[in-house]
Every structure is written in structure tokens, then in C-alpha cells.
Amino acid sequence: MIENETKYVVEVGVADSLRLDILNIIFTPLSIKLLDFVPMQSTVIDLGCGNGCMSLELAKRFDYVIAVDNSAEQLQIARKSAEQAKASNIEFLQTDVNSLRKLLSSKVDAIYCRFILMHLKNHIEVLQALKDCLKKGGYIIIEEPYTYSVTSSPHSIGIAHAIELHLAWSRRMGLDFEVGSRLAGYLKSAGFNIIHDKIVSPAPVKSFQKPEGDVIKLLHKNCKQQYIEAGFAISEMNRVEREIEKDMANELEIQPISIAQFVARK
Ligand SMILES: C[S@@+](CC[C@H](N)C(=O)[O-])C[C@H]1O[C@@H](n2cnc3c(N)ncnc32)[C@H](O)[C@@H]1O
């Protein structure tokens, strides 16, 4: 049973899998570099593992990986890709982040988390709970959006409106999609020692190079129902959708969000 569950407000499972795959293509080359900070003989949690793209990368490098997500659907996809990759050193754990401390107190050498704090509230409390899961001197690697801005060349009004809407929605949900810009303070408040701190931008992607260029389209499509439930007008959703369709018919160079990367120790 999942206790203290925090509601994740984006689609899960197959519906969001392609979007996560694209994010993986865009961001993993930058993420991989952070893994060098952690000794290879480690047990590592992949927190909010999603469809498990990073769990596989962690499993190639570290002794043991615990892939954690509160969504059974995400874990099902992650488990399948681990089987296909014959990665036998990954364990899958369905639980909410708030219950981890009880299950894994002082048990792990490192925690990796990407694009998860942006979906949570009470960041300092969450970080303190994660710290409790680490052995003394253990590592936390965090990657979260720094500025939630996506630009394109030539300029796309559709992309600009889609991002504006997504940010407005996140605020209405009480979430901070630019949590990366505040993480240094949060980590210090939770008692971590920061050993690496960098803002990075991935290489631009060409919209015609499928599937990378379609990430905005997918984001809009996958969140549309949630936008409507949060009170945004259907007519506005449809207008943004038409704008994205029209702009995406042209070749665009898209600059994805920049992210804050942190490595800190207990
Ligand atoms: C944006 S996805 C990121 C997936 C993955 N970390 C990546 O970078 O590809 C966020 C993931 O966190 C999971 N999640 C959201 N809230 C959670 C919570 N409270 N406890 C555990 N997992 C959660 C979601 O189910 C989703 O798979």
C-alpha cells in the first residue's frame, strides 16, 4: 500500500512514454557526466524513475539500482525495458517518495533524481527524507529545470504559448517548475554539502528530426485534460494546439529548457 501519496499531475504509462523517451535523448548526455562523482560499487536509487531510461544507465555503471516510482504503469514500462536490456541488477519499488525513509533508512549509497522535485511540494522536507535514506557520506544527484523557457528559431508563437500555459498551470497546481534555481538553498537547509553545482543547456534540436521536435506537441496533448480540469478554457487549449501544428509544419531549431545540476553529500 502506498502511504502519503502525492498526486502526480502529468499522464503516466504509455501515454507519456514517448515524451519521456525524447527527454531522455535530449538530457541524458548531460546527466551521464554527473555519475562520475559516485563510486561504482554503490547501491543507487533512481527516484521517480518514469519509464526507466536512467535506471538502465545507472545499472550499467553501479552495482545495484532501486528504481522507485509511485506509478505502477511507469514501473511496468521500466521493468519491461530492463528485461529487454537484460539488466538483472535493478529492483523495482512502487512507493511514494514520502514513504521511502521508512523503507530504506540509511540503506543506500546514492540517490539520483531528474525532473521529480518539480512535481513535488515541501522540497526541504522531501530532501531531508531522502537524506535519511543515505548512508553517511552518501550522494544525491539532482537535475531540475532552472528556467522553464523553450525558444525556437524561427520564433514559434505556438511553442511560446504552450510553455506559457504549462507554467501558468504548474503555478495553479502549486508546483515550482523552476525549482532548479532554488535548489542550492533547499539542499543546504536540508543539511547537504553541495560538491557540484552547474547550470547546463542541452544542444538545440531540429523539429523535423522526429521524434525530438515533437516534445512540445506531446506535452500539450498529454496535459490538455489536466489543463481543462484546472479551469483553463478549452478554446484556449485548441488555439494553442492549432498554433503548434502550424508552426511545426516548418523546420524549427528548438532550444530546450536549461537545467540545474547538483551533486551533494550527506
Ligand atoms: C517527469 S517524470 C521523470 C522520469 C525520469 N526521472 C526521467 O528523467 O526520465 C516524473 C516521474 O516521477 C514520478 N512521481 C511523481 N510523483 C511521485 C511521488 N510522489 N513519488 C514517487 N514517484 C513520483 C512519476 O510517476 C514520473 O514517473
Image: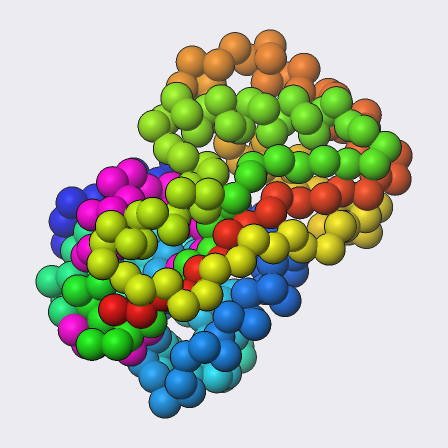
Q: Residue at x 75, y 22 (%)?
A: 157
**Near-viewer residue (173 or 19):** 173
**Near-viewer residue (84 or 200):** 200
Q: Quadrant of the N terminus?
A: bottom left
All told, the count of numbered labels is: 0
Q: Position of residue 61 (x, y in %)?
A: 48, 84
- In the rendered image, is residue 51 in sight? no
Is 242 colored magenta in this rendering?
no
Left or right of 224? Residue 154 is right
Q: Residue at x 34, y 84 (%)?
A: 42
Q: Residue at x 20, y 48 (%)?
A: 125
Q: Position of residue 75 (x, y in %)?
A: 38, 61
Q: Quadrant of residue 8?
A: top left
Give above or below for 173 relative to 51.
above
Q: Position of residue 187 (x, y in %)?
A: 31, 54
- In the rendered image, is residue 98 in sight? yes
Q: Residue at x 16, y 45 (%)?
A: 4
Give above or below for 55 relative to 205.
below
Q: Position of residue 50 (x, y in %)?
A: 44, 56
Give above or below for 26 relative to 228.
below
Q: How is the image coloured?
A: rainbow
Q: Quadrant of residue 95?
A: bottom left
Left or right of 125? Residue 168 is right
Give above or below for 27 relative to 225.
below
Left or right of 25? Residue 118 is left
**Near-viewer residue (45 or 265):** 265
Is 124 colored magenta in this rendering?
yes
Q: Which stretch did the figure color magenta?
A: 106-129
**Near-viewer residue (140 or 9):** 140
Q: Quadrant of the C terminus?
A: bottom left
